[in-house]
Image: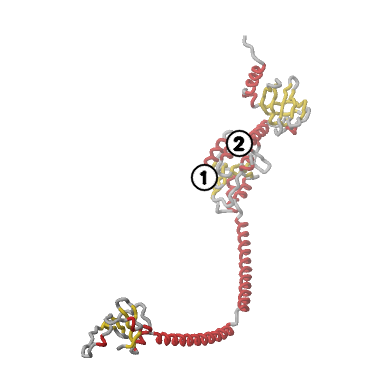
């Protein structure tokens, strides 16, 4: 015989209860009793009838908790759970409604709560509509008045938009999957900027396909923004909550997705007039500014005639001063030239002087004692030079000393006026 611990039995009970499909999705009708709330905001109560009692828990934030009152009969949705620490079986309520509400209303509230918890109604994910759509898709019946109403509104307001119809049944048991197929086809191949999904008014049963979970998830998955226009203004479906925008009627949906061309024309005319006035005012202001600048420039211009006369006077003064300076410099140059001419040894030699030097040692002869008889001499003249030998003047007169004419050469190093001697 097997023996189990309390925990093993408790967890087995928990697994058994919480894996039962019936107990995982359950509607229960009963009378509220032992109602109390915790400091954390959770609600604890019991549902009872004449023979039994069921302990219930509603965590904070669940819908319908504010409707609970001691002794009231309610319909509650939730699942059965086993609390192992306390050893109690509890009905975990996630939705409570007054008894007498129809089955469809209860299912609608349950599905709304489920999808809302998954984030399908999140406002932050809803996309804005294009202001000037080129193509508008419509998912509705091809034979009903809805599509024709949408056509008339768009043709009147904004005829530039092209309408694309994806026909489908919008009522009946098989309508939901057909609506999904039409929406997916239009989203995939319609190349639309926005899609209107909807139908005319009717009872809750007539509108029920737009409360189906498959339709809600198809709208949520659509890459193209969706506008829900189901029934009349007072009707409310799950499609309205999931869609990017809800319209009270199909005609109102058509007005929401396209602009009014008459309003656009008035806006354009107003903008054109405003722009014209701005341009005229700006042009006038610029012309006034330009005239003011021109006047200031004219007033600030210098007296050019007086400046010309001053320039002429200064030019004459400069010319006179330059002439005097040039004359003075010419006189200085002429005086310097005269001094150079007076000091020029060549000019001195042209007057009959010559330079005598000893070629062997390169000294200029300035004294007779520097020369001995027989010394070779070199005599430089104004033009050319001659060679001589010292002492040859004592030879007989009939003997003519041999001379050799030498081409003019560079002045010997060290020659100066003191070395000049008269040509013999």
Alpha-carbon neighbours of circle 1 within 10 Å: few (<14), some, or many (≥20)? Answer: some
Mark 1, secondary structure of its residue? loop
Q: Circle 1 sits on which residue?
A: 190
Q: Residue at x 25, y 85 (%)?
A: 392
The image shows residue 385 at horizontal and vertical percentages of: 29, 83
| Closer to us: 115 or 235 | 115
| Closer to us: 357 or 184 | 357
Residue 410, placed above or below residue 396: above
- The number of numbered discs placed on residues in the rendered structure image is 2
Can you tell which of label 2 and label 1 is closer to the viewer? 1
Alpha-carbon neighbours of circle 2 within 10 Å: few (<14), some, or many (≥20)? Answer: many
Residue 209 got which mark? 2
The image shows residue 123 at horizontal and vertical percentages of: 64, 42
Q: Is residue 40 left or right of residue 131?
A: right
Quadrant of residue 350 within the rendered picture: bottom left
Q: Quadrant of the C terminus?
A: bottom left
Residue 40, placed above or below residue 12: below
Residue 145, placed above or below residue 394: above
Residue 64, placed above or below residue 80: below
Mark 2, secondary structure of its residue? helix
């Amino acid at each position: 015989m097997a023996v189990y611990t309390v925990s093993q039995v408790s967890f087995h009970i928990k697994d058994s209860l919480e894996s039962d499909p019936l107990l995982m999705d359950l509607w229960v009708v009963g009378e509220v009793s032992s109602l109390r709330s915790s400091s954390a905001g959770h609600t604890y109560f019991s549902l009872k009838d004449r023979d039994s009692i069921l302990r219930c828990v509603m965590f904070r934030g669940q819908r319908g908790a504010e409707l609970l009152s001691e002794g009231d009969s309610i319909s509650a949705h939730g699942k059965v759970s086993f609390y192992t620490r306390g050893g109690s079986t509890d009905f975990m309520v996630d939705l409570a409604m007054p008894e007498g509400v129809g089955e469809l209303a209860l299912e609608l509230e349950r599905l709304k709560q489920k999808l809302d918890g998954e984030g399908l109604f999140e406002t932050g994910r809803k996309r804005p509509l294009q202001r000037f759509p080129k193509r508008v898709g419509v998912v509705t019946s091809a034979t009903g008045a809805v599509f024709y109403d949408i056509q008339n509104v768009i043709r009147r307001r904004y005829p530039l938009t092209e309408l694309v119809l994806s026909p489908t049944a919008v009522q009946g048991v098989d309508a939901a999957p057909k609506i999904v197929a039409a929406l997916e086809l239009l989203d995939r191949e319609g190349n639309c900027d926005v899609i209107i999904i909807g139908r005319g008014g009717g009872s809750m049963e007539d509108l029920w396909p737009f409360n189906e979970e498959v339709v809600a998830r198809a709208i949520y998955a659509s890459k193209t923004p969706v506008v829900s226009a189901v029934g009349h203004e007072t009707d409310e479906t799950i499609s309205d909550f999931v869609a990017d925008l809800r319209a009270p009627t199909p005609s109102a949906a058509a007005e929401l997705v396209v602009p009014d061309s008459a309003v656009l024309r008035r806006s354009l005319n107003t903008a054109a007039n405003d722009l014209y006035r701005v341009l005229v005012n700006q042009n006038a202001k610029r012309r006034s500014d330009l005239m003011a600048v021109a006047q200031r420039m004219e007033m600030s211009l210098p007296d050019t005639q007086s400046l010309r006369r001053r320039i002429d006077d200064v030019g004459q003064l400069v010319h006179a001063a330059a002439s005097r300076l040039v004359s003075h410099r010419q006189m200085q140059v002429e005086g310097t030239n005269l001094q150079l001419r007076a000091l020029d040894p060549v000019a001195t030699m042209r007057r009959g002087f010559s330079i005598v030097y000893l070629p062997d040692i390169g000294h200029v002869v300035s004294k007779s004692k520097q020369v001995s008889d027989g010394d070779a001499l070199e005599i430089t003249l104004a033009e050319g030079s001659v060679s001589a030998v010292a002492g040859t003047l004592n030879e007989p007169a009939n003997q003519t000393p041999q001379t050799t004419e030498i081409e003019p050469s560079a002045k010997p190093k060290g020659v100066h006026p003191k070395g000049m001697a008269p040509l013999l």
